[in-house]
Amino acid sequence: MMESMVKCLRALGDENRLRILMLLRERDLCVLEVVGALEISQPLASSHLAVLREAGLATARREGRRIRYGLSEEARRGGKHRLLKLVADSIHGEPLIAADRERIAECAAFRGDAACDKKTLAHYHSQRSRT
């Protein structure tokens, strides 16, 4: 139990992982959606998601060729839920968190029913940079 909580606290000690968790509280995401929302590289996003999984805060499930990430049961309702809720409540109003939410919503609206893939993400970024 102690080791699990230490991993959880270490995972929460990184800004990008906190940002990812705040998005995962709203809905499941693929790694490319994380890349689009946080504007970080795919390897960095994958690395952060691996740390969150190792800490018991996130899960991964295969959906066709993609892997979807979501909050773990423990992060939703278990022992880590209270800690995550406390952290989320304290950073909810942060402009960076609001901007992440806005970008993920824009990306989802832009994508529509299209696949979550690198081509769609690149097109989204090119459209976004024009505005």
Image: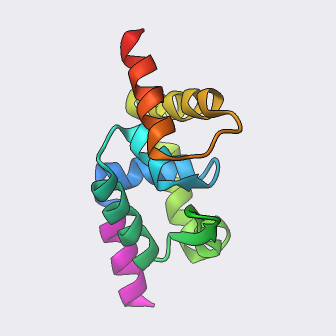
Of the pair 81 and 28, the residue shown nearer to us = 28
Span highlighted in magenta in the image = 1-11
Of the pair 89 and 74, the residue shown nearer to us = 74
Image quadrant holding the C terminus, namely: top left
- Residue 80 at what x, y percent from top left? 53, 71
- Residue 8 at what x, y percent from top left? 40, 73
Image quadrant holding the N terminus, namely: bottom left
Is residue 91 in sight in this rendering?
A: no
Is 69 covered by the magenta stretch? no
The majority secondary structure of the magenta stretch comes to helix
- With respect to residue 81, does 42 lie above or below? above
Left or right of 130, for residue 84? right
- Residue 36 at what x, y percent from top left? 43, 38
- Residue 97 at what x, y percent from top left? 44, 35
Question: Residue extending furthest right?
Answer: 113
Left or right of 113, for residue 53? left
At 31% from the left and 64% from the top, the residue drawn is 47
Q: How is the image coloured?
A: rainbow
Of the pair 50 and 99, the residue shown nearer to us = 50
Is residue 100 in sight in this rendering?
A: yes
- With respect to residue 105, does 80 lie above or below? below
Left or right of 47, for residue 31? right
Of the pair 19 and 127, the residue shown nearer to us = 127
At 57% from the left and 52% from the top, the residue drawn is 29
Is 4 covered by the magenta stretch? yes
At 40% from the left and 45% from the top, the residue drawn is 35
